[in-house]
Image: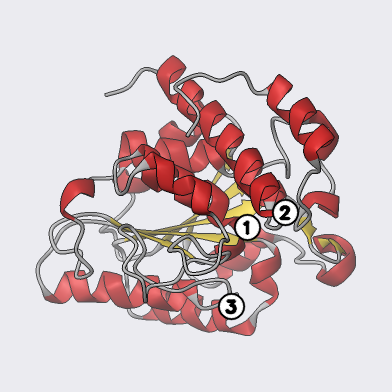
Amino acid sequence: MLKISELKNIATQVRRDIIRMVNGAKSGHPGGSLGCADFLTALYFNIMDYDAKNFSMNGENEDLFFLSNGHISPAFYSILARAGFFEISELASFRKINTRLQGHPCTHDGLPGIRIASGSLGQGLSVAIGAALSKKLNNDNHIVYSLHGDGELEEGQIWEAAMFAAAKKVDNIISTVDYNGQQIDGTVKDVLDLGDLKAKWEAFGWIVLETNGNNISEVIETLKIAKEKTVKKKPVVILMKTEMGFGVDFMQGTNKWHGNPPNDEQTKIALSQLQETIGDY
C-alpha cells in the first residue's frame, strides 16, 4: 500500500504528463483531466484490484473501471501507463495519427486498460451496469467503477440507466460524478442547471456519498466507505467536487481549458508549478 505522499507524487506526475501530452498534440482536454488526477491515482494505486500485466477484455476476477467522460483521456492514459498497462514512453504518441492513444479512448487498436470506446457522453453508465450484472451472473464478487462528468448528467440515458440499476438492485457498482461545475459551453448551472444532485440520485434509489476530489486522502476514505456500502441492494454514487484545471493556477476554475491546449510558454509556466516527481516520459 502506497503512502499518501507517494500517491501525491504520482498525481503530480500525472498532471505533468497531461500538460505535456496536450501541448505536444496541440489538441486535447487538460481542464477536466487535471481535476480528476487525484481520483484516478487513488483508484488505481490504492483501491482497485486488477492485473495490469495480464489485461483481458473479459475482466474476470478483477475490478473494472469504465471512463464515460472520455475527453479526459490524457489523465486516463497517464494513469494506465504509470500503473503498468503499457510503456510510459507511449504517452508521447498522444493524438498522433495511427497511434493507440487517440483523443477519445478506443478499442480497435487493443490498448491495454481500455474496455470501451468513450467520449460520446451518456453511455458509460449503461455499459458499467451491464458489466456489473455480468459479474453477478458469473459469481464474481469484484466491483465495477465508472466516472462521469457533471455536464454528462444532462444526457437522458444516464437517468434511464440510473433508474434501471436501482430497480434491478445492481449493488456491485460504484459510480463517481466529477462535479466541477464546468462544461465546454460555460458553467453547468448556466447551460442546464442540474439542481440538487444528491436529492436526484437518492430519488432514483442510489446510495449517495460526497467527497473532495482534489484531496487524495478524502477520496480514498470515501471510496472505502463506498465499498462497504456495496452488496446492500442499492447502487452507490459519489458526488466528487473538483476544480477544473486543478494544480495549474491559470487553468483553475474556468471552462476556458476544457478543450484548449496550452501553448509552449503556458506549458513552461504550468510545468514550473508541477515539479517532476517520478520521471517524465
Could you give the CA–CA distance between mark 2 and mark 1, rounded to whole angstroms? 37 Å
Local SS, label 3: loop
Q: Earlier in the sequence, mark 2 or mark 1?
A: 2
Could you give the CA–CA distance between mark 3 and mark 1, rounded to whole angstroms? 24 Å
Could you give the CA–CA distance between mark 2 and mark 3, rounded to whole angstroms? 21 Å
Residue under circle 1? Answer: 198
Q: Is residue 262 above or below residue 203?
A: above
Local SS, label 2: loop
Query: Residue drawn 58% across and 64% down?
Result: 103
Mark 1 residue crowding within 10 angstroms, few (<14) / some (14–19) / many (20+): some
Dot 2 amino acid type:
Lys
Q: Quadrant of the N terminus?
A: top left
Relative to residue 178, is residue 256 drawn left or right? right
Q: Which of the 4 quarters of the picture holds residue 202?
A: bottom right
Contact between labelled residues 3 and 2, with CB atoms less than 8 Å apart? no
Mark 2 residue crowding within 10 angstroms, few (<14) / some (14–19) / many (20+): some
Q: Position of residue 163 (x, y in %)?
A: 48, 79
Q: Is residue 39 above or below residue 108?
A: above
Query: Residue drawn 48% across and 60% down?
Result: 101
Dot 1 amino acid type:
Lys
Residue under circle 2? Answer: 26
Q: Is residue 50 visible?
A: no
Q: Pick the residue in front: 258 or 253.
A: 258
Local SS, label 1: helix
Dot 3 amino acid type:
Ser
Relative to residue 242, is residue 269 drawn left or right? right
Q: Pick the residue in front: 240 or 258.
A: 258
Residue under circle 3? Answer: 120
**Mark 3 vs mark 1: in front:** 3
Q: Earlier in the sequence, mark 3 or mark 1?
A: 3
Q: Pick the residue in front: 142 or 112.
A: 112
